[in-house]
Amino acid sequence: MKRKNFLKQAGVAGASFLLHQQMLAAFATVADNTLKIGVVGCGDRGNGIIRVMKESKAKFEVIAICDVLKFRVAAAQKLVPAAKVYTDFRQLIENKSIEAIVIATPLSLHYPIAVAALEAGKHIYLEKAMTYSIEEAILLVKLAKQYPKQIIQVGHQYRYTPLYFKVKDMIAKGYLGKITQIETRWDRNWNWRRPVPAGYTDEQVNWRMYKKYSGGLVAELLSHQMDFINWAFDTHPDVVYGTGGIDYYKDGRETYDNVQVTMRYSKEGMIGNFGATCANEREGYIFKLKGTKGTVSLLMHDGVFYPEKETRKQLETVDGVTGATKLEWNKDGGVQIMNEPMKDGTWYAFEEFYKVVVEKSTPVSNVITGGTTAICVHMANQAIYNNTIQNWKNEYNLAAY
């Protein structure tokens, strides 16, 4: 690893950054036509997506919204007052003016709504995790093959964020060396509950707490980091271990408030550790990739490269080409991966969604990749809740269908 190549190719501490062609093209609107959208699910995530589409450079028009909870609909109407309101997703999907559906409902509803949207000829932006179960992931992949003209993009937005693409590029170019350990956490000191208005049930509002609707902390949080590892290394785990419990909030919830998952990637010789608790926020979000040449430590919009001792010596070598460029080390001995300001990952994801719908191309986060991560999530939950070791099976290789 020569310092000039590190600066030029990895882009660390430089002004420019590398993006794959799909990502780069997504920054510019590729056509003038407006994409008419129906949003199913108007909770925090659904309304957040509506805000992103309103701010996007691409041309989205939300013409319909749907939710079974009236107070959710009321909040969405403030964002898109002209949108037609539905309480049944089937009726929204029957609206022939709608070209694409955003699905931001409880996890248990992802599959049936996606099936109905495909059969009605709609494009789909489907929030993560793609499906509630492994069986549904396989069935949705098979069904999508019957509708090749329709787009399914899954909401794993790390695949569109410039910082995370940069890290993927660094991994591919060997700047971290041989990576053997991945450490991730997503912690908070909060019960994860929303207030329940009069006339509604806890299951309706706090569906994340109930197993029949939710994949819990693994699906809602850790799936993002699991998906990045699948993407960055073009892999999946072959053995999954897990444990957890309702260790603090004895409030009637069913999904665990404290989980730990270990995934073994035998082909790559890596171990991934994925954990979350609702009882301590000191470390918050952690995502570390540890290699023989260095460590990458990531936040959502920030990242630092910490070289090993020998790697740092190489980077500090001054020659005629690199002598004019000085690496800015932080107090911990790391160097900033990117200095450019970034938007939220969902913004990049929806620029891409517009592009792939207009161009009829395949999104980076698609039904195969989204289904693979959904399978990883389900394996993790099976290991956690059933105290079992889960092994990857041949039928989980979705590209083969």
Image: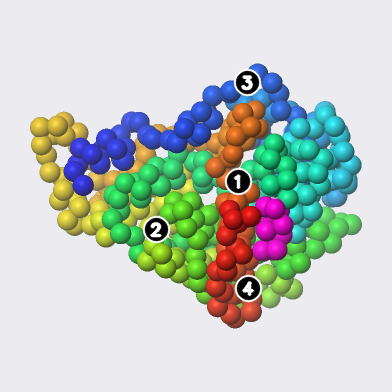
Of 47 and 379, nearer the camera is: 379
Which residue is under mark 4?
382
Of 380 and 325, nearer the camera is: 380
Q: Looking at the image, tell me whether mark 1 or mark 4 is earlier in sequence order.
A: 1
Q: Looking at the image, tell me whether mark 4 or mark 2 is earlier in sequence order.
A: 2
Residue 316 counted in the magenta span: no
Mark 3: amino acid: Ala
Q: Looking at the image, tell me whether mark 2 or mark 1 is earlier in sequence order.
A: 2
Which residue is under mark 2?
288
Whether residue 108 sits left or right of residue 224 in the image: it is right
Q: Is residue 166 something one can see in this rendering?
A: yes
Label 3 Cα neighbours within 10 Å, binned few <14 / some 14-19 / many ≥20: few
Residue 121 position (above or below residue 138):
above
Whether residue 77 sits left or right of residue 10 in the image: it is right
Looking at the rendering, the stretch of residues picked out in magenta corresponds to 131-142
Q: Which mark is residue 31?
A: 3
Q: Which mark is residue 366?
A: 1
Q: Looking at the image, tell me whether mark 4 or mark 3 is earlier in sequence order.
A: 3
Q: Residue at x 80, y 63 (%)?
A: 203
Callout in the foreground (4, 2): 4
Image quarter of residue 376: bottom right
Mark 4: amino acid: Gln
What percent of the width, then of the height, locates residue 70? 86, 46
Q: Secondary structure at mark 4?
A: helix
Callout in the foreground (1, 4): 1
